[in-house]
Amino acid sequence: MLRLPIPEQLVSDLNLAAEKILSFDSAVRIFSHHDADGIAAGSILAKALVREERKFHLSIVSGISDEVIQWISKEKDRLVVFLDMGSGDIEALDSLGPEIIILDHHQPMDYSGTALEINSHRYGIDGTREASGSTMAFLLSLTMNSGNSNLAHLSLAGSTGDRQHVGGFRGINAKIAETGEKEGLLISRKGLNLRNVPLRRALSASYDPFVKGLSGREKEVEKLLEDLKIDGEKRASELYEDEEKRLGSILLLRLLKQGCRSDIVDELISKKYLVPSLNIYVSEIADYMDASAKKDSGVAVSMAMGDESSLYKAKELAEEYGEVVLKALLTLEKNRAKEMENIQWFWSYESEVASAQAGIGMQYLLNQEKPAFCLTETNDGKIKISARGTKYLISKGLNLTEVCRAASKVGGKGGGHDIASGCSIPAKKKKEFLEIADEIVGKQLKK
Ligand code: C5P
Ligand code: ZN
């Protein structure tokens, strides 16, 4: 039974999906996305099915590739569930044969076929800011069994991976956090948004926030801590109130000076959720899932499902991932982006962290008046692009879903959210696509 306030039509569609999945005789085939949100969504559904003693086969994929399509076409009598993806390819999936269930939060297309598409946007729930793929999977798991409420931390960790925590959880996510707290599954605490490690490391290794002159600069961090008379071995949560205030105001000033917008600066002091049963923060789970998703999705899923040795491995992967993200941001700080009239773009040389480099770079380093397009060359003659905006640009009319969908004009494919989208284009169409993007963004921002 669902105790969360959600639209009736959504309750009824979730019931239908739960019924179809739980009554399916053989293994349900699940595809989920290879980022923190997809890992969380996949792990939630996997955990719920294990608890019901149902068979399933979960694959973590980067998208609905030709290979995925081919596989599905061959398995006509299967039930296939897509998590955190599917809405953008629904027409193609619908005609393949197997019964399809989609739980997604990306901008849906016009569609009236037979697939059961449970996309938050279709029920008036803002899938960009208030519900992620993991939120949708969590709602489905609760529909199957209310005992799955203890997976709330995974739901929120997935949403955190999709940056829906910025400015505080909202809508259905906020309700999940509130209910989790009431049930004793989560404990919230407001404090400096730094990792739970000694401050000298938390500051010098911090990439989100990326603080110019401190992130990646150990000596400057030492000097700052010395000047503030703060012990670098302390963690942010161990600081006295006056120490936290002193450090907080310095970081805040630095972020303002480097041009960050107020909603990002406000994140410096934010609410964090501790999962007492695991003694780990939701944001840490998100980081671990994010880092291990692309490197070893098996580790990411096992960790999310509660395996201790995978947690240890995921922590290691997160350390390595953090170092690469930091390096990519320091490179971006040095090289900057190339500016066109309405957009800015840059090459990423650290392809495995391009999404993070684009998103964090947009918030802490780049021109705040233009969306950023981060380009990575792939070895199949294509360019993968991560496009990122800010809340401010969205308020001025930016919609990156529309821009990335225009990749189809140059033989590419794309989609996503208004504030964060992606696409893939033939390498030789780079100039043409950037000009199209520049023109569309120009129109959007001048409306
Ligand atoms: O790859 P990246 O992290 O930049 O993707 C940003 C968003 O755009 C994600 O939500 C992803 O699912 C979506 N996307 C998409 N189609 C693509 C590439 C990305 O819908 N071809
Ligand atoms: Zn997502």
Image (spheres, rainbow, N blue to C red):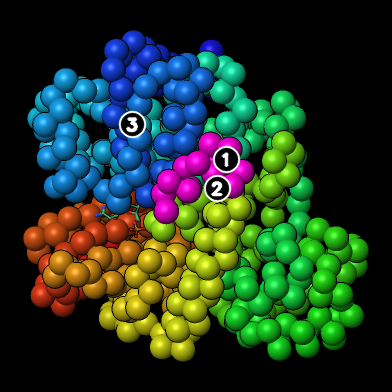
Where's the C terminus, which quadrant? bottom left
Report the side of 154 relative to 49 (left or right).
right
Counting residues from the N terminus, which is met first, the one under dot 3 or under dot 1? 3
Residue farthest toward the front in the current orientation of the protein: 309
Q: Are marks 1 and 2 in contact (CB under 8 Å)?
A: yes
Choose between 139 and 222: the one closer to the eye: 222
The correct choice, above or below, for 387 with respect to 255 in the image is above
- In terms of depth relative to the viewer, which is nearer, 46 or 110? 46
- How much space separates mark 3 and mark 1, taking CA atoms? 18 Å
Dominant secondary structure of the residues highlighted in magenta in the image: helix
Which residues lie in the magenta part?
Answer: 296-310
SS class of the residue under badge 3?
strand
Q: How many marks?
A: 3
Instruction: Identify residue type, mark 1.
Output: Asp
Q: Which residue is mark 1?
A: 307
Q: Pointer 3: what residue?
A: 57
Q: Earlier in the sequence, mark 3 or mark 2?
A: 3
Is residue 302 found inside the magenta-colored segment of the image? Answer: yes
In the rendered image, which residue does mark 2 sit on? 310
Is residue 355 located in the magenta-colored stretch of the structure?
no
